[in-house]
């Protein structure tokens, strides 16, 4: 299939996101923590190495249970904050109170204090191949200041049209480039007005279009791919696991799964000629079980139609033995059956 985009055949905002820049409000939970042991505690509570993060830097990591099941994927940002170092934890929308309670449960004599900033802040995503140029123009800085940000690192800029400060955080690739903008809730309307002044040059993406782009990029989402039914290795989050760091909650389970190659299911992509229902399941009919359908070996977690690929696509979990690209599977949803092909993620680079 050609990589050239026929813009006229797509939703206009989708096409602009693919070729230039688009944006979308993207609520996140935000916790602030301070104290001399702020990084030490997070080091013991999450999968990645956060102990060496410095002011202006950030690390993406995973909160997991003692059985290594996913609670949430978070970005930890270290700040100097006027001579008083602290960290911000950026969480999935709605996870702030749960993570705060989870941290409190494991905080004993630690020099660690937490504050929930979610209600005081607003956030949005800016993404697309020209998003760095757009953000440099929006904030009035030289392009290298935006382009030079490393993954998960951040800096504070301002929007000249409003004079308001925004925190710019480099995010994992999404339509080539992606940035998260954090601001005070009281400043949100002014920043949104500045963005909307660009009109169709930088359109706002609706939820349906964003979901299509998310699935194309192979991005997981809390409640879909990220649930307490799965661990980070199954969910394709191995890059957020540091196998060399010391003990943390769930570490023994993660190490055992990796050492003995015991990852039973994996997050993969699927394509099909017809719509793929979320919740459709896969069965191994050769297995001996009490079920007439055999043993369940996977399910669909998210699905969409990809205009760029011209086919239906989906994310889902599949038993490792079947999870190789090119494998043809039968998905079952109620009385409906459809043929899908397993593909490597992401669907679109």
Image (cartoon, helix red, strand yellow):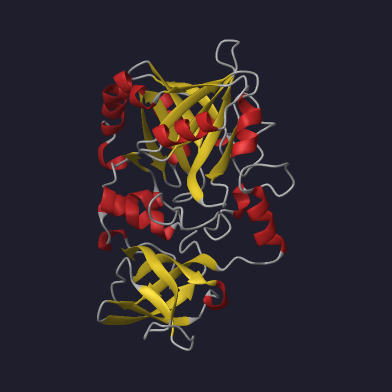
Q: Is the residue 211 above or below the residue 183 in the image? A: below
Is there any visible trace of residue 273 in the rendered image?
no
Residue at image point 43% right, 29% down? 30
- Residue 244 drawn at (x, y percent): 74, 46
The structure residue drawn at horizontal position 60% and vertical position 10%, both measured from the top left corner, is: 83
Q: Is residue 43 depicted above or below 343 in this figure?
A: above
User: Picture quarter containing residue 211?
Assistant: bottom left
Query: Can residue 120 be seen here?
Result: yes
Drawn side of residue 76 relative to residue 225, left or right = right
Above or below residue 147? Residue 316 is below
Q: Quadrant of the N terminus?
A: bottom left
Front in this rendered view, residue 94 or 310: 94
Q: Quadrant of residue 185?
A: top left
Spot occupied by residue 234 in the image (x, y as percentages of width and height): 54, 61
The foreground one among 27 and 162 is 27
Q: Residue furthest top?
A: 83
x, y percentage for residue 162? 33, 18
Q: Residue furthest front?
A: 290
Name the residue located 49 percent from the left edge and 61 percent from the top edge: 346
As rendered, which of 138 and 237 lies closer to the eye? Answer: 237
| Residue drawn where x is 50% and y is 44% of the image | 73
| Count of number-bearing discs | 0
Q: Position of residue 7 (x, y in %)?
A: 31, 59
């Amino acid at each position: 299939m050609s990589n050239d985009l026929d813009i006229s055949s797509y939703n206009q905002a989708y096409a602009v996101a693919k070729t230039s820049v688009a944006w979308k409000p993207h609520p996140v939970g935000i916790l602030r923590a301070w104290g001399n042991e702020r990084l030490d505690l997070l080091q013991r509570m999450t999968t990645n190495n956060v102990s060496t993060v410095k002011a202006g830097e950030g690390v993406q990591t995973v909160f997991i249970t003692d059985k290594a099941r996913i609670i949430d994927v978070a970005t930890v940002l270290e700040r100097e904050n006027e001579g008083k170092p602290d960290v911000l934890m950026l969480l999935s929308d709605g996870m702030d109170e749960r993570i705060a309670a989870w941290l409190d449960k494991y905080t004993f004599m630690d020099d660690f204090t937490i504050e929930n900033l979610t209600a005081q802040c607003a956030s949005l995503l800016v993404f697309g191949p020209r998003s760095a140029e757009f953000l440099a123009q929006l904030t009035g800085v030289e392009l290298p200041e935006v382009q030079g940000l490393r993954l998960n690192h951040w800096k504070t800029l301002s929007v000249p049209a409003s004079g308001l400060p925004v925190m710019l955080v480099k995010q994992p690739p999404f339509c080539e480039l992606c940035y998260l903008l954090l601001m005070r809730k009281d400043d949100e309307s002014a920043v949104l007005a500045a963005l909307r002044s660009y009109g169709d040059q930088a359109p706002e993406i609706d939820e349906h279009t964003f979901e299509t782009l998310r699935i194309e990029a192979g991005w997981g989402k809390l409640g879909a791919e990220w649930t307490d039914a799965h661990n980070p290795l199954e969910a394709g989050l191995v890059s957020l696991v540091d196998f060399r760091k010391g003990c943390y909650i769930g570490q023994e389970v993660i190490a055992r799964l990796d050492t003995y190659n015991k990852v039973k299911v994996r997050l993969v992509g699927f394509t099909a000629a017809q719509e793929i229902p979320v919740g459709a399941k896969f069965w191994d009919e050769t297995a001996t079980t009490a079920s007439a359908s055999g043993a369940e070996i996977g399910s669909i977690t998210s699905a969409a139609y990809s205009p760029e690929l011209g086919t239906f696509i989906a994310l889902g979990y599949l038993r490792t033995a079947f999870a190789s690209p090119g494998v043809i599977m039968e998905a079952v949803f109620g009385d409906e059956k459809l043929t899908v092909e397993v593909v490597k993620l992401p669907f679109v680079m």
